Image (tube, rainbow, N blue to C red):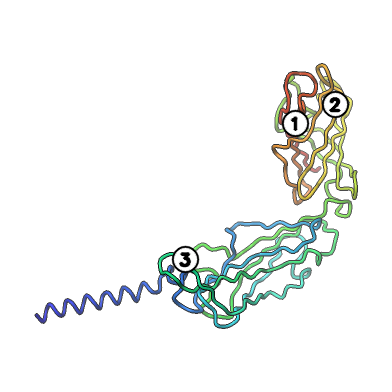
């Protein structure tokens, strides 16, 4: 009898030990039992890059995810700005390296525990692009690094887990003339290979010169012979930078079967404006909309311009 009671008491003791240990698990930390214990992190997964542009003077906002059930005091989150290349963000932006999240809690239905409390306020670290002196000579790239909080139980990231605590920001120069980019000599290559006539589309490896055109100088032109084995007269090729995309113009060539072949935008594969002017990819359709009378239409070709 004494032995049986001892076994029962031991079993209860072991159950209490299991409950006590499990109350410190990650699930409980995530879903609610303890106040002012948890972690902060970014919403994205490393490596992640947020891109802005001088041409789009709006704020860049980086959300900070707070994994804490409840805070009874304001949560002060500290961060550093670390230059990677270009201008130093610490000399450009008025950020003081801290954001403050007010104390609070919000009820929601937890996945296993019914109704519990978890802090769901999403503060943001903001950067005003209009604070950047223009023009930018090169892309401005820096990291935002979470460094700590004013509450000892709220850590940066969770030990042993892979959470994003570093966010990279890239701000691109203007594509207009103030930035003095996407201009000058480039090597033209044709990664897509020969034309349907089994001859080169343009001369691979030739040097072309980009010049500005259009309103505010946001368009570019270069001249190169199309199908040089048939005609050495250069064609004018044009493209524009519009809302972060490369918009290609239509070129009517001097070559064709029963009519002139047009080369124009491949609307199935519109590319983004690169953040630096070291290389530019241009996606075209050869025989645009059946032009040239050669029995084919909309054959995709790509030109690559690499700065000399």
| Disc 1 residue crowd, few under 14, some 14–19, many 20+, Cα 10 Å | many
Could you give the CA–CA distance between mark 3 and mark 2, rounded to whole angstroms? 61 Å
| Coordinates of residue 207 in the picture (x, y in percent) | 83, 35
| Residue 267 sits in quarter | top right
**Count of marks, rendered view:** 3
Residue 209, image x, y percentages: 87, 39
C-alpha gap between disc 1 and disc 3 = 51 Å
Q: Earlier in the sequence, mark 1 or mark 3?
A: 3
Q: Nearer the viewer, residue 270 or 212?
A: 270
Where is mark 3, residue-wise? 160
Image quarter for residue 1? bottom left
Which residue corresponds to the image point at 53% horizontal and 70% vertical from the top-left?
67
Q: Give whichever of 202, 253 is nearer the camera.
A: 253
Residue carrying label 1: 285
Instruction: State how far apart marks 1 and 2 are (Cα).
Output: 13 Å
Q: Where is the C terminus found, in terms of image quarters? A: top right
């Amino acid at each position: 009898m004494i032995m049986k009671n001892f076994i029962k008491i031991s079993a209860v003791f072991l159950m209490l030990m299991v409950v006590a240990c499990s109350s410190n698990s990650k699930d409980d930390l995530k879903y609610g039992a303890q106040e002012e214990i948890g972690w902060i992190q970014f919403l994205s997964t490393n490596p992640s890059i947020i891109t802005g542009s001088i041409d789009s003077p709006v704020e860049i906002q980086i959300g900070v995810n707070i994994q804490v059930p409840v805070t009874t005091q304001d949560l002060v989150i500290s961060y550093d700005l670390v230059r990677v290349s270009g201008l130093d963000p610490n000399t450009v932006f008025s950020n003081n390296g801290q954001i403050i999240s007010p104390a609070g809690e919000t009820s929601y239905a937890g996945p296993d525990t019914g109704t519990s409390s978890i802090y769901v306020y999403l503060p943001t670290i903001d950067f005003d692009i209009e604070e950047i002196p223009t023009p930018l000579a090169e892309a401005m790239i820096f990291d935002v690094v979470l460094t700590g909080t004013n509450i000892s139980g709220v850590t940066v990231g969770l030990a042993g887990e892979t959470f994003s605590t570093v966010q990279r920001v890239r701000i691109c120069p203007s594509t207009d003339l103030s930035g003095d980019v996407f201009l000058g000599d480039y090597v033209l290559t044709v990664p897509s290979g020969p034309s349907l006539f089994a001859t080169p589309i343009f001369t691979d490896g030739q040097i072309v010169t980009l010049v500005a055109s259009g309103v505010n100088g946001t368009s570019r032109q270069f001249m190169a012979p199309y199908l040089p084995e048939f005609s050495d007269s250069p064609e004018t090729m044009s493209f524009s930078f519009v809302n972060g995309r490369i918009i290609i113009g239509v070129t009517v060539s001097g070559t064709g079967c029963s009519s002139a072949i047009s080369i124009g935008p491949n609307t199935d594969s519109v590319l983004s404006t690169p953040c630096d002017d070291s290389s530019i990819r241009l996606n075209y359709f050869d025989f645009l909309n059946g032009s040239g009378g050669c029995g084919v239409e909309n054959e995709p070709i790509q030109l690559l311009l690499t700065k000399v």
